[in-house]
Image: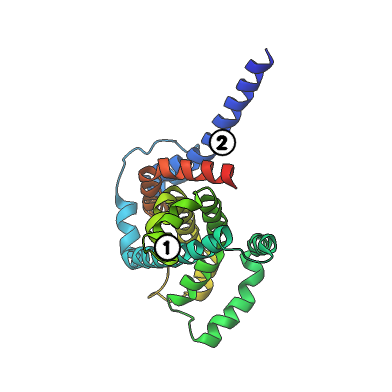
Amino acid sequence: MPNKSNKFFVAFALILLVVNGVYPMVWVFLTSFKNDIELQTTPIGYLPQSWALTNYQQVFVQQPFLQYFFNSVFVSTVSTFFCVIIAALAGYAIARVNLPNRRLIQTLIVAASIFPVVSLIVPLYQMMRSFGWLGTYLSLIVPYTAFSLPISILTLTAFFQGIPKDLEDAAMVDGCSRFGALWRIIVPLAAPGVATASILAFVNSWNEFLLAVTFASNQATRTIPPAIALYQGEFSFPWGIISAAITIAIIPIITIILIFQQKIISGLTAGSVKG
């Protein structure tokens, strides 16, 4: 009897988790097809009556959304690339090199991820202004890379520690350098961890709002999150257009997660076990 009750509560918790995550996405998707009259009707209907694509057309008419979409793709991809490269080197050093105070280093890495972005916005702004990076891609790529590094380093460190050291020793005996053994042997074997770290870094960069609206306020470098906020007028909230823009923005994330679903699950599970 206790086992049945435990299964019931676990199933109930999972259902709540799924509903909490899926229901807002479904509601936004349905809202993106509604016109202003349907949105102002009370009580609001769940399904749109016309399923019109007007809101999706207005997304690209009212603002240069394709430019913002490209900016988000570029910034997120480049920051993810540098994040994974640096995290792989740091994770390998922690896992394989006999570093002094290794535990202290890992503790400092965890501590670096505790500080909220809003508490660092002023010194970061002054830094970007002194470097002349405000309004450029670098003003987003560098902070995004830095903020995603802690979780990426810890994830890859856990995977590297689970790979037998004999494999890279054998590669180095055959003439491969330590650096070559890392990229040719260790990183491919840690593919689930690399995929997990890459996706987490990409999603964090793609969804970030505060730094984007502060450092990249011009049209040339503006990303999707602050662009969506600009659809709001002084006295109006075009929920249909905003919902359409949000739907377009989450398509890449959903696509990536569906494609790499197995690697994400295996990466998170294996990382938690090995860590």
Q: Which mark is residue 137?
A: none
Element type where label 1 sits in the image: helix
List the single residue furthest toward the front: 173
Image position of 31 (left or right of 121):
left
Residue 232 in view, yes or no: no
> Badge 1 local density, few (<14 within 10 Å), some, or many (20+)?
many
Task: Tell me which residue sits at (49%, 67%) in the image.
Answer: 86
- According to the picture, the residue beneath numbered tag 1 turns out to be 224
Q: Which percent across, then down, holds residue 60?
A: 31, 61
Q: CA distance from mark 2 to mark 1?
A: 27 Å
Q: Position of residue 215 (x, y in %)?
A: 51, 75
Determine the residue positioned at 44% across, 36% down: 46
Identified by mark 1, the residue type is Ile
> In what element is the residue under mark 2?
helix
Q: Compared with residue 158, is residue 209 higher up or lower down, i.e. above or below? A: below
Quadrant of the rendered image containing residue 258:
top left
Few, some or many residues within 10 Å of mark 2 (<14, 14–19, 20+): few
Task: Identify the disc placed on residue 17.
Answer: 2
Residue 269, image x and y in percent? 53, 41
Could you say which is closer to the camera, residue 111 or residue 253?
Answer: 111
Q: Amino acid at mark 2?
A: Leu
Q: x%, y% of residue 53?
A: 29, 49
